Amino acid sequence: MLLLKCEESLLLLRKELESHIPLSLKVYGAMLKILQGNPFHQEILVDSWPNFNAVLVRPQKKGETSSSDTYMNSYVYFFKDPTSVPGSFIEAIDWTQAFEVQGLQCFLGEILLDAANVRHTSTEMTTLITFCQDKETHISIPNPSRGKEAEIASLTLSHAELVDKTWAFGGSDCSLQYVRACITNSPSRCCLTQYSERAISWALTDQYWAIRMAYTLPEYRGKGYAKCIVSSLADLLRQDGRPVYCHVEEDNEPSKALFRSLGFKEVTSDKLLWFHSTPDAKQ
């Protein structure tokens, strides 16, 4: 795999990826972050250049990330031709540490499982539904039924512990640091109570520009805060020329209903593959 370093090559790749959305969404989102200053310290590799088939985004090897930090040890991929996966692609992944791989072409799951078995690593794999909002979509930001009690703002680091505590994949030092990185380097929206500035509903974006961690405190649900937050964040992303998309667990009916009500459409071409690998401690 070849590392793309110069901005000219990255811009050419960005243009090419735009013609393959939505399947290239994850890589395209990472590309935008890298061109924005690369706050999440990622790098892009291709199997050949300028005529490429495989693209892999991986963390830069700076020695700053814990070997058990799957949030930052994250890889995303895209293939023009799904029937051709170069061996160098698998070798470009650091199998000595815990990591995750995400992509909208689920065929890679079996290839990753075979590679994990050879390397004696523990794995977990699942799929999620992807929802996207078209560039032309315009949804008026709804007012919550008790909107006078709250105002829309961006999340701050003071909210990080609450976001991490309520996140299904949170609750660790690594997840808290990841939440802080997302709040610091990516757009977010929250509803704050008017007087205490307590966050009661929120959503943020990650290193791939995906909307995630949407949550409303139980006592404030059913009042329209989630619709307000997600629509506000989607509008911000769209105005900035960013992709507007998210991933939802297949059994999460409330979230699916929420995004559909805001004009998000399900990507039926393929689901999001989420692959997790951890080295076997006995090896």
Image (cartoon, rainbow, N blue to C red):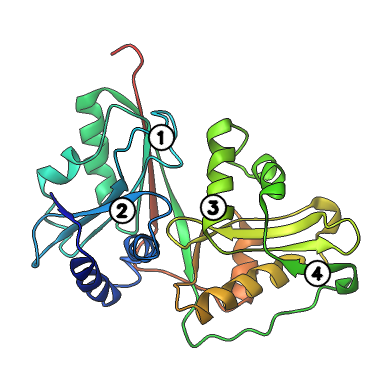
Point out residue 150 in the picture as x, y percentages from the top left corner: 84, 67
Amino acid type, callout 1? Thr
Q: CA distance from mark 1 to mark 4?
A: 36 Å
The residue labelled by disc 4 is 151
Amino acid type, callout 4? Glu
| Foreground: disc 4 or disc 2 | 4
Point out residue 280 in the picture as x, y percentages from the top left corner: 34, 19
Q: Is residue 248 visible?
A: no
Residue 167, above or below 219: above
The residue labelled by disc 1 is 65
Point out residue 167 in the picture as x, y percentages from the top left corner: 63, 44
Q: Quadrant of residue 116?
A: top left
Name the secondary structure under disc 1: loop
Disc 4 to disc 3: CB gap under 8 Å = no
| Foreground: disc 2 or disc 3 | 3
The residue shown at (58%, 86%) is: 138
The residue labelled by disc 2 is 106
Q: CA distance from mark 1 to mark 3?
A: 15 Å
Viewer-side residue, 34 vs 145: 34
Q: Quadrant of residue 126?
A: top left
Name the secondary structure under disc 2: loop
The residue labelled by disc 3 is 182
Amino acid type, callout 3? Cys
Q: Give me the disc on residue 18.
A: none
Amino acid type, callout 2? Cys
Circle 2 crowding by C-alpha within 10 Å: few under 14, some 14–19, many from 20 = some
Residue 57, above or below 63: below
Name the secondary structure under disc 4: strand
Q: Is residue 180 visible?
A: yes
Dot 4 or dot 2: first in sequence order is: 2
